[in-house]
Every structure is written in C-alpha cells, then in structure tokens.
Image (cartoon, rainbow, N blue to C red):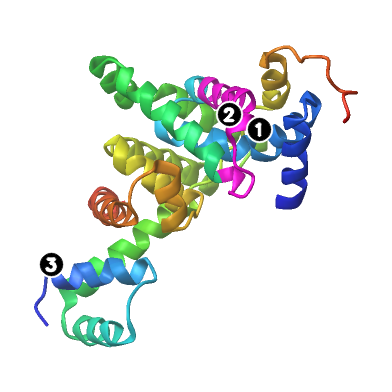
Amino acid sequence: MKCKPETVALMHKYLDGELKQEEERELRTHLQQCSACQNHFHELKRTITMVGSSSHINAPPDFTKKVMAGLPKQKKRNNVTR
Amino acid sequence: METIIKQKIKEVKKGDQSSFEDIVSFYQNKVYQICFRMIGNAHEAEDLAQEAFIRAYTNIHTFDERRKFSTWLYRIATNLTIDRIRKKKPDYFLDAEVKGTEGLDMYSQLAADQALPEEEVESLELQSYIHKEILALPPKYRSIIVLRFLDELSLQEIAEVLDIPVGTVKTRIHRGREALRKRLRHV
C-alpha cells in the first residue's frame, strides 16, 4: 500500500466508522510498518479527543426566561376546542 | 424525552405558549453551545441563540412532526450564525479572534465560580486554546466540527442540519480534522 494520501483517506474512513474489514486490515498492516503514518494517525485521534473533551458550555442562567419574554404576545385561543 | 418534546410541540402548535418554555429549557445549552463555538463570543452567542428560539416559535407550524425537532432547531441556529459571520466586517472579525477577550472572560468566570485547583485552570487555558483553534477554521468547517465532535451528531444528521449532501459532510470533516490536527499537534 502506498503511503499518503491513500492511507490518510483510510484513517478518516476509520474515524468515521466506515472502514470495511479488508480496509481495516490494510490500514493496520501499513501502520505497523510506517512510523510516519502511525504518528499521523495518533495525532488525528488525539485531536478528536481534545476537541471532544473541551467542556460543554451552558446558556446563561436566565436564558429561558429571556426567550419567553421575547416571544410575540399570545393570542387568546386556549379554550378553542372543536 | 423525545416523546415529551413532541407533546410540548403539539401544545405550542395549538396555541399554548407556556409549553414552549420546556422546549427552550431542554435545548438551551445545546443551541447556545453551537452558537458560541461558531461565533466565538458569549454576548453574540446569547443573542443568536435567543433569536433561534424565537424563530423556532414563530415558525413552529412549519415543523414537520415526523422529523427530529433537534435537527430542525439546530438548522435555524446554524443558519442564523452563519449569516451573522458573513455579515461581520473582516477587520472586526480578525480583531475578535486575536483578542478573544469575551471567550477568555467566560473561561475565567468558570474558573472563579468553581475555585478550581491549578491543573484545572491550566486545562481551562487549554480549552480556551482549543476553542480559538476551532474559531480559526473557515466557517463551513467550523460548523461541521462543532456538530460532529461537540454534539456528536451523525453524518446524516449533520447533512440534514446544514442541508448539504453526506459526501460533502465527509469531505469537510476530513479537511477540518486535518486542519485541526496541524494546529493542535504541538499542544
């Protein structure tokens, strides 16, 4: 198997969970032999971990209240049943 | 939860405004986070997220209940945010990126509230760094990275939110991932 970009494409397919069994074997065999690709793969996985672990940010405490206050005035039609 | 939300949407459609409160309260953090990660500062993110919910409310009758509400809502939020990014003057935008004060303020507030030990403050600095690196990506990659790695949406869902083919989503994820790899490899 040639080094890049074919290998890199396989890495991304792997990270998207779309690698076929045969391709996975191909990728694994290559990674065992090529330290440059191994390093590339490691960096990609690390990047995903870093981005994914960046803390979740919450909306300000009075957010919902402000949205509700900003809604257009409600029409009186609560009791309309047919 | 989806069932409760579905019920609430029905009530809102019937004219019960108060039922919308539960919907906002349930999705507020997700929507706010998408806006914040894409636009980069807390004040504008709040503004955009509020606008997204108000639009969702006024257009609720166009929401098809057979579809996923979150996808529809995220689409409103990302469209609004992308529009805002486009309208920003480039010089102001650059300035905001370099200083990034509001983003930093936000992280320092977090740190103060919880009185974190030193290593966690360091990690907040790292978080702020990662946030800036995401912001440095072109908007079309940024939205995808945020939806994929922070909200863990599937490729199909992202395609629906952004109204682009799944193939395009894949290409942009690959490129975005490579760009971030280069930016974060030395951290």
Residue furthest top in the image: A73
| Span shown in magenta | B46-70
Q: How many C-alpha atoms fall within 10 Å of the one at disc 2: few (<14), some, or many (≥20)?
A: few
Q: Residue at x 38, y 43 (%)?
A: B163
**Which of the chains bears the disc numbered 1?**
B
- Decide if residue B28 is on the left or right side of residue B173: right
Please name whichever residue, B124 or B148, is drawn nearer the observer in this view of the structure. Answer: B148
Q: Is residue A2 above or below residue B158?
A: below
Contact (Cβ within 8 Å) of mark 2 with mark 1:
yes
Q: Which mark is residue B113?
A: 1
- Identify the residue under disc 3: A5
Snapshot quadrant of residue B87: top left
Residue B56 % position (x, y):
59, 29
- Identify the residue under disc 2: B109
Snapshot quadrant of residue B31: top right
**Which of the chains bears the disc numbered 3?**
A
Residue B24 % position (x, y):
68, 32
Mark 3 to mark 1: distance in Å?
47 Å
Q: Secondary structure at mark 3?
A: loop
**Which of the chains bears the disc numbered 2?**
B
